[in-house]
Image: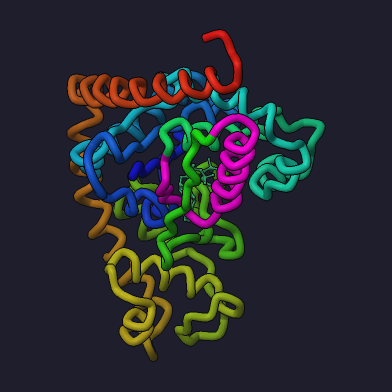
């Protein structure tokens, strides 16, 4: 069974990315069957500055290594396996414009302004379907925001299999039940995002203790003064409770029991400590790795080799049944 997931190097990853998806990148079998991709072609849809873009890509790779993901999985960069874009083109001939128009992430990211949105943003879910189907991936650890895209990947796999030949397996999303969606710290009705222009809205994996303290202390709560897990009426407090429970690996009930009858300041102080407990060791390792070009190059070389081998085999099958000269 192949597990696949991707993260865009569109900024330094947030605890939302980490708790919602990356923490779920667990070994389930062999290195060859756990594929974690740095999806830089997806990140291109936000038109990044080239120098910064390269730095962010390397930084994400170093973070994957700092998290030990390379020990049990294959890590690779999307643009280094050209078959992703090759398959995406074929799938683009099967997707319907209406299906892409219904994608909520496209609507959000384009601010409902079709005239000015780039076409890459529009066809992004097709490239994502190609990323997944290229490896016959079955388990996809992602946050809740990606569910609609996984559904489209299933639709396209089925459409392709019915039209040509049964080649693709149908992927299934694997959600982290508690942390499927972490919300913005200053606007808890919005998802926490690494590319949010307001850095106060997120905790980056590389934020130092002082920054984390400032951001958590200024996070939006409410005037009720009672600690309850009530997403509708107390979204800010509920979000802080979710983050705490994930950092401590305890249930929401245990978290509420701990904070019952306490002040918001007590919750925030404990949360700062819990986040730092998770991030400090990750950052220590990250700063050792980011300057070690040799390790980075080796992980990349090994990852590209494994991914490319699999992708070439799959594309040969696809091209054959579609009737393309290869
Ligand atoms: N707030 C979140 N809570 C839980 N999971 C999240 N994910 C993202 N934000 C949250 C999950 O992280 C993985 C990687 O995401 P991505 O880089 O592919 O892009 P995204 O979903 O668009 O994440 P961001 O942080 O919001 O990036 P930008 O700002 O560039 O758009 C995915 O599995 C995602 O579900």
Q: Could you tell me residue 106's position as x and y percent? A: 68, 42
Residue at the top extreme?
325
Q: Residue at x 60, y 80 (%)?
A: 233
Can the viewer see residue 290?
yes
Can the viewer see residue 286?
no
Decide: is 123 above or below 302. below
Residue 256 lies within the magenta run: no
Q: Residue at x 34, y 53 (%)?
A: 24
Decide: is 55 above or below 326. below
State the predominant SS element of the stretch in magenta. helix
Q: Could you tell me residue 261's position as x and y percent? A: 39, 91
Point out the stretch of residues depicted in magenta: 137-165
- Colouring style: rainbow
Quadrant of residue 285 in the image? top left
Q: Could you tell me residue 94's position as x and y percent? A: 68, 32
Decide: is 131 above or below 251. above
Which of 256/324 is in front?
324
Which of 19/209 is in front?
19
Residue at the bottom extreme?
261
Residue 138 lies within the magenta run: yes
Q: Residue at x 59, y 13 (%)?
A: 324
Residue at the right extreme?
115
Which of 157/61 is in front?
157
Q: Could you tell me residue 223's position as x and y percent? A: 57, 81
């Amino acid at each position: 069974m192949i597990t696949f997931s991707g993260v865009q190097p569109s900024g330094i990853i947030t605890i939302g990315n980490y708790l919602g998806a990356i923490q779920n990148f667990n070994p389930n079998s062999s290195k060859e069957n756990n594929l974690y991709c740095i999806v830089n072609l997806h990140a291109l849809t936000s038109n990044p500055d080239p120098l910064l873009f390269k730095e962010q890509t390397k930084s994400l790779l170093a973070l994957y290594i700092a998290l030990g993901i390379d020990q049990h999985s294959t890590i690779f960069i999307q643009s280094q396996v050209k078959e992703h874009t090759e398959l995406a083109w074929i799938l683009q001939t099967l997707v319907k414009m209406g299906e892409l128009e219904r994608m909520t992430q496209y609507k959000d990211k384009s601010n409902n302004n079709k005239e000015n949105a780039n076409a890459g943003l529009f066809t992004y879910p097709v490239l994502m379907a190609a990323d997944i189907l290229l490896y016959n991936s079955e388990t996809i650890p992602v946050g809740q925001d990606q569910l609609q895209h996984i559904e489209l990947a299933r639709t396209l796999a089925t459409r392709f299999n019915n039209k040509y030949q049964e080649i693709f397996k149908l992927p299934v999303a694997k959600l982290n039940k508690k942390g499927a969606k972490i919300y913005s710290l200053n606007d808890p009705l919005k998802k926490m995002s690494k590319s949010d222009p307001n850095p106060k809205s997120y905790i980056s994996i590389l934020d130092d203790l002082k920054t984390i303290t400032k951001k958590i202390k200024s996070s939006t709560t409410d005037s009720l003064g009672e600690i309850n897990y009530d997403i509708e009426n107390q979204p800010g407090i509920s979000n802080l409770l979710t983050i705490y429970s994930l950092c401590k690996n305890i249930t929401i009930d245990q978290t509420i029991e701990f904070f019952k009858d306490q002040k918001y300041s007590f919750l925030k102080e404990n949360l700062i400590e819990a986040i730092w407990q998770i991030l400090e060791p990750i950052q220590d390792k990250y700063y050792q790795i980011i300057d070690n070009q040799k390790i980075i190059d080796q992980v990349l070389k090994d990852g590209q080799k494994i991914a490319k081998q699999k992708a070439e085999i799959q594309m040969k099958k696809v091209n054959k049944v579609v009737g393309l000269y290869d």
